[in-house]
């Protein structure tokens, strides 16, 4: 479990856009941190808790309410990305296919995507849909951490048992498993740790050009995308398949 991170202050949160697909997303000038989970996992409440703004992401009692890729610029330096839940089943089949494809395209092809926060409900035993999604992230080498939500709604012992069972189910896919965090939007438990992860990633990106720079001073500085790719290669603590 994560611990000991400094509290990261969110001084501004600005809505950028709701994009129906990858091509509609804003420019790639800022690092992005994406949040995704099964429908009704508590993603919108978590995002509002992280940002300190209750109206940042709309909370709906209807599972699968988020249908677009919603992007917010935080502190004028990075983007928080609210991705649609992968368990959404309402609507026409062709709409579901297009919706799933847009998420897939974003996760596989967005060059400035730094890290995915994969949300899992702590009160449930390992669900096939969550396991399948994590396997998909591993197969496509998408860097991610696991975040178990709604810890206030389940006894601690049960939550820990469910988390241990989930980690056991996915352990064969990794040489070193992904980091695991727990959170509760109701109690704000986990806010410090999750924002600390983002702060750590941003700091690593900032130092990447210094460590990766070639001796020849005439060479251009690496782009943000190159720095993020270099940062991914240098960080063994993120998920690595087998």
Image: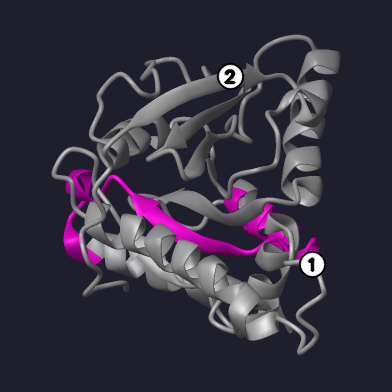
Tell me the quarter of the image containing the N terminus: bottom left
Give the residue displayed 68% in from the left and 29% down from the top.
26
Q: Residue furthest front?
A: 218
The spot of residue 36 in percent (x, y) is 54, 42
Using the rendered view, name the quadrant where residue 140 is placed: bottom right
Name the residue carrying label 1.
Answer: 220
Camera-nearest residue between 55 and 43 = 55
Q: Which mark is residue 10?
A: none
Magenta span has 37? Answer: no
Along the line of sight, the residue nearer the viewer: 137 or 21: 21
Q: Of the residues tagged 1 and 2, which is closer to the observer?
A: 1
Residues at marks 1 and 2, CA–CA distance in whole angstroms? 31 Å
| Res 5 quadrant in image | bottom left
Q: Position of residue 186 (x, y in %)?
A: 17, 38
Rendered residue at 36%/30% (across/down): 13
Which residue is denoted by mark 2 in the rendering? 17
- Can you see residue 205? yes
Q: What x and y, as percent, mark residue 160?
A: 29, 68
Tell me where the magenta segment starts and ends, as one range. 130-157
């Amino acid at each position: 479990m994560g611990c000991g991170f400094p509290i990261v202050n969110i001084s501004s949160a600005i809505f950028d856009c709701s994009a129906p697909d990858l091509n509609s997303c804003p420019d790639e000038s800022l690092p992005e941190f994406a949040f995704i989970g099964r429908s009704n996992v508590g993603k919108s409440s978590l995002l509002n808790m992280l940002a300190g703004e209750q109206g940042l992401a709309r909370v709906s009692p209807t599972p699968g309410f988020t249908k677009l890729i919603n992007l917010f610029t935080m502190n004028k330096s990075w983007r928080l990305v609210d991705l649609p839940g992968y368990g959404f089943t309402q609507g026409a089949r062709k709409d579901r296919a297009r919706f799933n494809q847009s998420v897939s395209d974003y996760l596989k092809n967005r060059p400035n995507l730094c890290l995915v926060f994969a949300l899992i409900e702590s009160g449930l035993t390992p669900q096939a849909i969550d396991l399948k999604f994590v396997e998909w992230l591993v197969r496509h080498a998408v860097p991610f951490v696991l975040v178990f939500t709604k810890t206030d709604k389940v006894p601690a012992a049960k939550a820990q048992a469910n988390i241990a069972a989930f980690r056991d189910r996915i352990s064969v896919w990794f040489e070193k498993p992904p980091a695991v965090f727990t959170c509760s939007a109701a109690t704000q438990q986990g806010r410090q740790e999750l924002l600390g992860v983002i702060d750590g990633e941003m700091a690593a990106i900032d130092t990447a050009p210094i460590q990766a720079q070639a001796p020849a001073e005439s060479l251009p500085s690496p782009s943000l995308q190159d720095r993020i790719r270099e940062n991914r290669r240098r960080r063994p603590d993120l998920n690595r398949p087998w």
